[in-house]
Image (tube, rainbow, N blue to C red):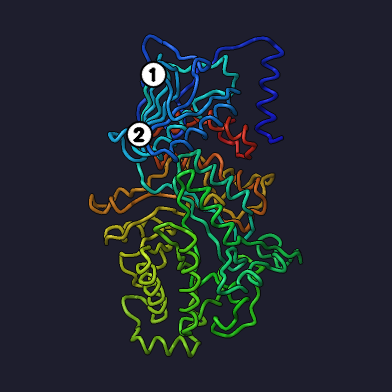
Amino acid sequence: MTFKRKMTTLLLSLWSFTGVVAQQMADFQIVPRPASVVVDAAHRQLPLRAIQCITYAGDEEPMARNARFLADYVKARCGLQLPVAPSAPKKTVAVRLQLNPQIAAEGYAIRADKSGLVVEGGTPQGVFYGIQALRQALPAAPADSVSLPYVSVSNTPRFAYRAMHLDVCRHFFGKSFVKQYIDMLALHGMNTLHWHLTDEQGWRIEIKSWPRLTEVGSVRRRTVIGRNTGLYDDTPHGGYFTQEDIREIVAYASQRYITIIPEIDMPGHMLAALAAYPELGCTGGPYEVCPDWGVFDDILCGGNPQTYRFLEDVVGEVIALFPSHIVHLGGDEAPKTRWKACAKCQQKIAAEGLVTAGGRSAEDQLQGYIVRHMVRFLAQHGRRLLGWDEILDCGVDSSAMIMSWRGEGEAVSAAERGYDIIMAPNSTLYFDFYQTPESDWSKPLLIGGYSPLEKVYSFEPVPATLSAEARRHIIGTQANIWSEYIAYKQLYEYQALPRMAALAEVQWVAPARKDYADFLKRLPRLVNIYQGEGWRYCDAALK
């Protein structure tokens, strides 16, 4: 029996044993904060037990799925099993899920009165977010004790791109956790998962045309103990996702209106690939799947024609698995040490007429050549390249999207030049940082840094110095969790929660309506769901 079911059974047993039914009201003071909550002045109520079924109208399959999700949530929270049907007689007291073209695509509206409950959205996705709002508003109590106020609620997200990042490379997390993580994003009204699938320490996606990537590159024979101490555990660590696993996870995410953006980092962070195919490196190796953390000199050889075939083959298989319009190809932390000494790279630089200019070395220009090659390749397949902000140093044009992690300065400059930007500054939105003071030695060993809940909540993705035209290029924001020091799912949960809730408020709520003290008052309703799901979270800000 799952933790959630055990808790529900225990609560229902206690309520039955005492014979006392304390009335509890649904409360729409939730996270993210709705744009509007208007409660009936006469304090009229809709008893949950009066609701007879859940109906859906509109886009049949997604709306039917939404209805089943809601039925599951109501049963888990309140022990009430509501049947699901396309329609019901006119006077039936029901939850009615329906589309309303007057509402923004991802927006929702909820209305409760004597006729029942209506959850509307501009699209099925908007209806789904309304369902998540209702899920959070309902108390964990038996249905006989629960009422909904006559109320009107509405909300629309501020940003179109609302994401979290998942690193399965440094430490491997399998299919069940990836699905759980998707559920966590869905609860918080997020619509994108940035899935980091390849790195120095492990290659995690099956590529059939290059099988040694997983045969060799998915397993490291040892892992450093602590922060690059020179001591190792001498224990193999590995795992990867088959293409069938990927399809299953992509479908699971799609059902929850989450797009998965895959990341294949290049030309750096490639030691796992070089261990499998040493001929792709400048020196020919030998290489090993990296047991340490950090940035390393060995990267793909920019002068080897086989490198370009490798990249096209890998990315070709990736885009066949992921329907996302955006594909992340990294581009960060690629030292040029090997390229400067590599005859093939220098020949390529000469052949392409790449020269030092504008503060960029000829080797930087070679990386730009690789990135532009992949921009064209993706465009030929109807996709768009997203990269870390280092690709700005390589002369890439604004057809590429930028994920800004090094600070506001790069984002401001790029947005003013017309690049679309996703804000992910490491100083605030790296959730592998501590969320309690690092001096508290009872906490697990992490990479360092300090980004507590209030700092995340206070983050403003649109820099004040941007021009009005440039502001529209800030398309959204995400938090990243790198897993060098996060080996267990419980710790990954703990690092994400409740900071994910603070980020959700940043993603949905206009700055003028944000209030940290008010957020803390609303947060316990969300934490109650964390507890019911058995998810670990940091309670430092809740004490």
- 399 versus 165 height, above or below: below
Query: From the viewer's perspective, is 45 left or right of 8?
Result: left
Residue nearest the viewer, comparing 336 with 527: 527
In the drawing, what numbered circle is on residue 155?
A: none
Split into 4 quadrants, where in the image is the N terminus? top right
Query: From the viewer's perspective, is 140 left or right of 402?
Result: right
| Residue in the picture at 35% in, 30% down | 35
The answer to whether one can see residue 428 in this image is: no
| Residue with the mark numbered 2 | 99
- 81 versus 206 height, above or below: above
| Residue with the mark numbered 1 | 90
Image quadrant in which you'd find residue 245:
bottom right
Split into 4 quadrants, where in the image is the C terminus? top right
The answer to whether one can see residue 438 in this image is: yes
Work out whether mark 1 precedes mark 2 in sequence or the reverse, and give the earlier one.
1
Query: From the viewer's perspective, is 540 left or right of 520?
Result: right
For label 1, the SS is: loop
- 278 versus 453 height, above or below: below
The residue type indicated by label 1 comes to Lys
Residue 234 at x, y = what percent? 76, 66
Is disc 1 surrounded by few (<14), some (14 to 19) or many (20+) residues within 10 Å? few
For label 2, the SS is: strand
- 98 versus 474 height, above or below: above
Residue 265 at x, y = what percent? 50, 67
Residue nearest the viewer, comparing 127 with 528: 127
Query: From the viewer's perspective, is 146 left or right of 117?
Result: right
The residue type indicated by label 2 comes to Leu
| Residue in the picture at 42% in, 10% down | 44
Image quadrant in which you'd find residue 233:
bottom right
Residue 348 at x, y = what percent? 41, 87
